[in-house]
Amino acid sequence: MDCSEKVTRRGKLSAGSVFPDPGSVFPDLSIEGPSAAHVKASRDRCESLYDLDPHSRLLYNRYSQSELVPRMEKVEEPLARAQPLITNIRTVVKNADYCMLIADDECAAIAEYHDTDLARYLKKQGIAAGTLWDEQCVGTNGIGTSTADTAPVTVNGEQHYHSKFFQFICSAAPLIDQFGHRYGALNVTGPATKSATEVVKLSQFVRRAVANLHSYVFRDYFKDHRLVVIADERFNSTDSMSKVFAIDDAANIIGVTNDLLASLEVDSREGLIGKPLSKFIGLDVDKLMSSDERLHELEHGKLDGRYALSVPPTKPRTTNTSTSRVSAVSKCQATEKSTSSIESNREEEPLDLDALAGSDSRMIKHVELCRRMFRNTQPFNAIPLLLQGETGTGKDTFAKAVHLGSNRRDKPLVELNCATIPESLIDSELFGYAPGTFTGGLKDGKTGYIEAAHEGTLFLDEIGDMPLDSQTRLLRVLSERRVQPLGASQSVDVDFALICASNKNLIDLVEEGLFREDLYYRVCGAKVTLSALRERSDFRVIAKRHLRRLDSENKVTISDALWKRLEDFDWPGNIRQLQNVLQYIVFSCDEGVATENDLPEDLLHEKSVRAIKHSHIAINSAEKNHIPTQAQAAVDAVACVYSEPMMSKRDQLLRALHDSRWCVAKAARSVGVSRATVHRQMKKFGIVRPDHQSHNLQRSE
């Protein structure tokens, strides 16, 4: 698309504008800020080179869905590898009330994430998939300037060249693949701010997010090779995996991350690829590899004073059963790869249903139900299963275990995370498309997820995030057991077992009009709610199982005091958080008895779940108690991706409920969320109405 066809040049006006005039005066930060040099250079280009008029009426260049599909397919491999981490970043952006875009290397927004009311307002203003953010078209902006300079850039308020963008702050940084090639940009957008601190924190978050994405893609691509991680400090949990070598069987370098390249002060990868690893770390490689997952201090060259950690290769894992899967595979590919994918997962997660149930009576009951449901089902007669539970409770792992224990275990397990696929592309991914449907699409068309799951199991994760239009098409498939790819004239029979999962209450979504009621009863043949980690009666059994996997040589023992601390913790991140904490303890202790001093720093400052519950009772039973009036700034949540749970949000919600005399509808309006969200947060934070609490106490007595 030639942007010159639609861009308003200096002195020329075009009718229509996507953006309304700003309703308030936004901060004139001039060219100050963390991206000052890039912003100044960009504005100079806009004025002297592109001859743009900053006060013209702006008409966007937009790509249609059919034009977006081939653009998405060009970058689907790195995005597929990065999807689990993109989901985490999306959650942080959502909590901070920002919106997020992913653009390709030509500044076209190919994916959008609008999860709050404010973010959806920004979408209406043009911050959406399909828009073109080339600097030559719309002037200085996050995506366009970051792409032009191949550098992280934050543009706030009147730093934008065009006046229509003065109401926004945009922070963007290039996305880099495993080979060091740029394939797009990540952008986070919100209202312009007068706070220089917010600007800096947002910039830091986006920089760290893209660095982590690059490392994640790199490690996933080279997972079948030995990795050597370089850590700046002995126990650094935040960026300890950003500096990584990948080596072949001869201990020669075959890959290196950008952060490590910068630490070595080497201009290009060509100076490292093929060279012996020992030349750069000054350490006997055989000694390093003989003690996998143990830290070794380095005393050589640019890496002097740092630490090396050898990570052995894993078995090959396909994208067929991974949450990072973006493109559907053909039925024969899915059948061929699904079993090996599940087997490779055995080393990381116990996929046996009994192992997942442990000794928890509630989980044992769930497992018995699922085993009866899926073991003897006949073709076209499988009962759909809906998995509910908090984030991190292992819904995807449970779904894989159900498949492995079913009579379809030798057939494909095909997984789609509805929250990670852009809304504009979900239909083509789920239902597939016929040859010639999209200009620039695959010549032979594409097999959709549903058809790929024929005779096997289809797992729809985060189904609550599926767009309503796609819900209608899915309902028809489930009703007729036939799927018609986009652009095709005929439909095909499909037979699959259906497992859906969501951390949202689908009934609440039905009441809000965000989820079809008829579809709910189609996907909820049986519902299983997985217990949160803090609710499990077999916490130590679970923790010891994961500890054995992380410390196969049993060099680390947990002290009684540390066990008590772990059992009392609230675990908002559930199993996923437990795995990270145990891994940190193993690295911190190295060997011997682990104590509370071996906990990550954020857990050292956390209150135990019992202390939190006591504080809930104290606040709810005495209205005269002081309740903090301000939530932590949204940008603080953005800056603390891996930090503590949102206690300030709990305080904010408590204040809203108190001020509204516990009227949920009024409290929801005051904090700008739905009633369903208030109910979910009350449950999450353990907030109980005073009168309900008294009733519960009387009933227990």
Image: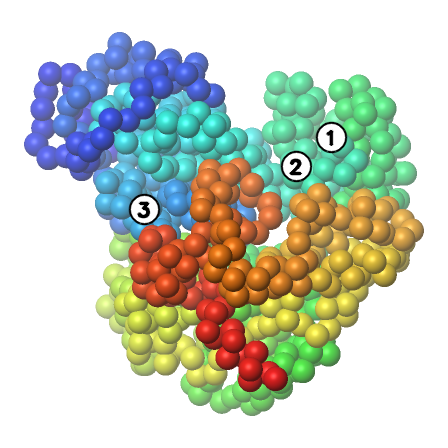
Q: Residue furthest front?
A: 624
Compared to residue 353, the image places residue 181 above or below, namely above
Q: Which residue is mark 1?
A: 232
Residue 340 at least partly seen: no
Q: Which residue is mark 3?
A: 118
Task: From the image, state whether disc 3 or disc 2 is nearer to you.
Answer: 3
Tell me the crowding category of disc 1: few under 14, some 14 to 19, or many 20 or more residues within 10 angstroms, Cα based.
some
Residue 574 horizontal side relative to residue 505, left or right: right
x, y percent for residue 48: 26, 9
**Which badge, 1 or 2, comes first in the chain's sequence?**
1
Residue 603 horizontal side relative to residue 418, left or right: right
What number is the disc on residue 541?
none
Identity of the residue drawn at 77% across and 70% down: 541
Q: Which residue is mark 2?
A: 239
**Which badge, 3 or 1, comes first in the chain's sequence?**
3
Identity of the residue drawn at 63% across and 81% down: 362
Compared to residue 224, the image places residue 475 above or below, namely below
Q: Nearer the viewer, residue 608 or 281?
A: 608
